[in-house]
Image (cartoon, rainbow, N blue to C red):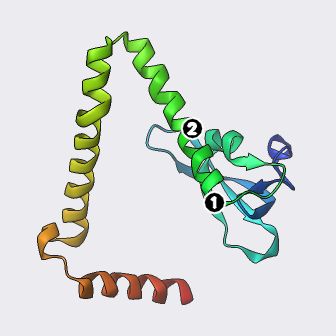
Amino acid sequence: MNNLYKEFIGKFIGLNKIRKVIDVEEKTFLGSKKVSLEYKGGADPEVYPLRMLGNMVTKDKSDLTKLREARVVAVIEDIIRILTESELTKPEIDFAVGPRLMESLLDGMKRAEAILWNKPEYEITLKDVNDVLTRSIDKKES
């Protein structure tokens, strides 16, 4: 075990108690370090950006809503830092963060889904969704 991560051992991410933290080769989109977390009690290991652990790890168990809030707070803080650094005016922030940001995110997700599904969203059927989920479950079980 890497002594750098001893502060996380025995603490929780949501309902899972951390048993081990391991460096992984995978990096984030911007090249930041990621780690794999192994839990006591047999929960599946999870990989997270190292920088997120400080917000996500708690001394006691927490429900998944609190875990989601902790993850989002870190991202919101980064967005506020970028907006502050950019010295945008209030109207520019209203425009950028309101409709523009959501439109951009949703457009990116829609384009990614079209590539993933190999067809436009309006052609995706419930059978397609079931086929993907069934394949995903089969992979996990094998």
Q: Where 95 falls versus 10 (above or below)?
A: above
Q: Where 36 falls versus 7 (above or below)?
A: below
What is the secondary structure assignment of the residue under circle 2?
helix
- Total number of numbered labels? 2
- Residue 142 in view, yes or no: no
Report the disc number at residue 138. none
- Residue on which disc 2 sits: 73
Q: Amino acid at mark 2?
A: Val
Q: Name the foreground residue: 36 vs 124.
A: 124
Q: What residue is rendered at 24% in x and 63% in y?
A: 113
Residue 86 location, quadrant: top left
Residue 109 pos. (x, y %): 27, 54
Q: Amino acid at mark 1?
A: Leu
Residue 39 pos. (x, y %): 77, 66
Q: What residue is rendered at 75% in x and 64% in y?
A: 16
Q: Name the foreground residue: 125 vs 10.
A: 125
Of callouts 1 and 2, which one flags the residue occurring earlier in the amino acid sequence? 1
- Residue 33 in view, yes or no: yes
Residue 120 pos. (x, y %): 12, 67
Residue 137 pos. (x, y %): 48, 86
Q: What residue is rendered at 64% in x and 52% in y?
A: 67
Q: Is residue 96 left or right of residue 74?
A: left
Q: Is residue 19 left or right of residue 127?
A: right
Report the disc number at residue 64. 1
Q: Where 37 falls versus 51 (above or below)?
A: below
